[in-house]
Image: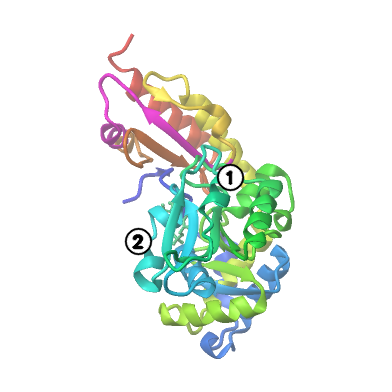
Amino acid sequence: MPPRIDLRSDTVTQPTPAMRQAMAAAVVGDDVFGEDPTVNALETLAAARLGKEAALFVTSGTQGNLASLLAHCGRGDEVIMGDQAHTFLYEQGGSAALGGIHPRTLPNQPDGTLRLEDIAAAIRSDNPHFPVSRLVCLENTHNRCSGACLTPDYTAAVAELAHRHGLKLHLDGARIFNAAVALGVDVQELVRPADSVTFCLSKGLAAPVGSVICGPADFIHRARRARKVLGGGMRQAGILAAAGIVALNEMVERLADDHAHARLLAEGIAELPGIRLDLKRVQTNIVIFALDHPRLTPAVLVEELRRREVGILAIGGNQLRAVTHYGIEREHIEEAVAAFRAILTTGIG
Ligand code: TLP
């Protein structure tokens, strides 16, 4: 049973009633033949919304990033990315395992950026000893960096640097709409500099399944081939795409509520004994904090919260993560804060 107040991830959202209705009513066809009208409608909508030429519906964020990397890079090519990037840490090294793509990691700064000078220094010259630098990847918002937002200016500066050296820029925009809402900018501003972007329908936007890759038509053509070899050629996938259309049309503005709830949670626990949390770093729906408590380890805190029907994740070392999303209301956050307080203050003071 999942915990009643499930802050482990925004991937746990349930589809909305409007999504279930749209799914039941979806007109479908064989998408591998390009004949599913609902998938086609989602792809057209997503491309227009992000200001890109074309789009491709994929099964997951992981598949979207991998198909994008396979479409940009050949075997032995090098991709530059952050050492805290989801693609580096949490996607099984799929681009190396399946694509022979060589990852070059650079230190992610706490704000999710890579230093421009680090990127410039990592780009290889033409030398038979070296792999060919082909691609830079950024992540916005940055999951492992507390949901930090990359700005349009920063993204444009990285794109300019990459393009000047003949590299492309891919954006893992799993939560790009969280960044757009938090920064108060049109999502197109955030993705314009990038050659390709993957965003997720199944995180804060609450669709049950799926992500979308957006980019130029020739790139999407290659990504479509990559999706097929990865086993992602779905057939009557309009059932799923229908929920994605509702997600894009109805679920973006409400992300502001998730951000307000994350802030409420962060403010509620920041002063509790044993918690180390920098409130400035909470910009969107992700709260990452460290536990340094005389009596509790992260695993024990997770277990104690769970007994009080609150779910969070231990993410390595002494760090923990809580994520707000559709279905989590203010009262849930207040309950969660009370649970933290009861656990952390017992036997102290
Ligand atoms: N992130 C999940 C877990 O895999 C850690 C989560 O709970 O946050 N890019 C980013 C930035 C992500 O956060 C995720 C999922 C993905 C890609 C992959 O998406 P899926 O889970 O759809 O493959």
Q: Is residue 26 visible?
A: no
Left or right of 341? Residue 27 is right
User: Within 10 Å of the Cα at label 2, are there few (<14), some (14-19), or many (20+) other Cα atoms?
Assistant: few
Q: Which residues are magenta?
A: 284-304
Vertical arrangement, residue 26 with respect to residue 206, above or below: below
Mark 2 or mark 1, whichever is nearer to me: 1
Contact flag, marks 2 and 1 (Cβ < 8 Å): no
Q: Which residue is mark 1?
A: 117
The secondary element bearing badge 1 is classed as: helix
Instruction: Give the distance between the C-alpha atoms of the residues marked 2 and 1, in whole angstroms.
Output: 28 Å
- Give me the residue at 59% from left, 81% from top: 221
- Give me the residue at 50% from left, 68% from top: 69
In what quadrant does ligand 1 lie? bottom left
Vertical arrangement, residue 273 with respect to residue 44, above or below: above
User: Within 10 Å of the Cα at label 1, are there few (<14), some (14-19), or many (20+) other Cα atoms?
Assistant: few
- Name the mark on residue 92: 2
Question: Which percent across, then down, holds residue 91?
Answer: 39, 60
Which three-letter amino acid code belongs to the residue tagged 1?
Answer: Glu
